[in-house]
Amino acid sequence: MFEGFCRTSQSRSHTNEKPFNSAKQITLCLVTAAFALAFSACDSKQENAREDAVEQKADSMENKADAVRDGAEKKADAIEEQKTMSNDSSTNSALENKADATRDAAEKNADAIENQAEAVRDQSPAPTP
């Protein structure tokens, strides 16, 4: 396949073949490689639309996870505000525990939603050659 590329000057001297123009060969190889790369990177409109839809769905899920965290933080802050109104240490401790549990539960829920979003992205169709 590459016999012509690998000929030495000695083998050419014994035949009637013209010497290879290595600059033209290199240019031809580079142009061919560039075209192959360009065409292999092209996606169809449908494929782009599918990928965009998958990204939008995953982004929406991540936004939901952020909203879960934000909502839980506000709820926990409200619980902690009740704590400052009370001077009873057992009540304060119970409220602190409740606020912490609210944050922990929201964090677990948000992490699960983000894991689902990642799974959605991983299931997106692979580009076709």
Image (tube, helix red, strand yellow):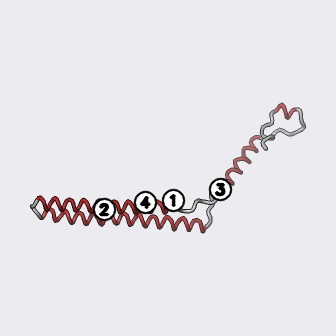
For label 2, the SS is helix
For marks 4 and 1 on the same chain, the one whose residue lies earlier in the sequence: 4
Q: How many labels sit on residues?
A: 4
Q: Nearer the viewer, residue 8 or 70?
A: 70
With 77 as the anchor, is 110 left or right in this view?
right
Considering the image in quadrants, where does the N terminus appear?
top right
CB atoms of marks 2 and 4 within 8 Å: no
Say the numbered circle drawn on residue 122: 1
Q: Residues within 10 Å of mark 1 (few under 14, many from 20)?
A: few
Q: Nearer the viewer, residue 78 or 99?
A: 99
For marks 2 and 3 on the same chain, the one whose residue lies earlier in the sequence: 3
In the image, which is nearer the foreground, mark 4 or mark 3? Answer: 4
Specify the amino acid type for callout 2. Ala
For marks 2 and 1 on the same chain, the one whose residue lies earlier in the sequence: 2
For marks 2 and 4 on the same chain, the one whose residue lies earlier in the sequence: 2
Q: CA distance from mark 2 to mark 3?
A: 48 Å
* Residue identified by numbered label 3: 38
Say the numbered circle drawn on residue 115: 4
Q: Nearer the viewer, residue 65 or 56?
A: 65
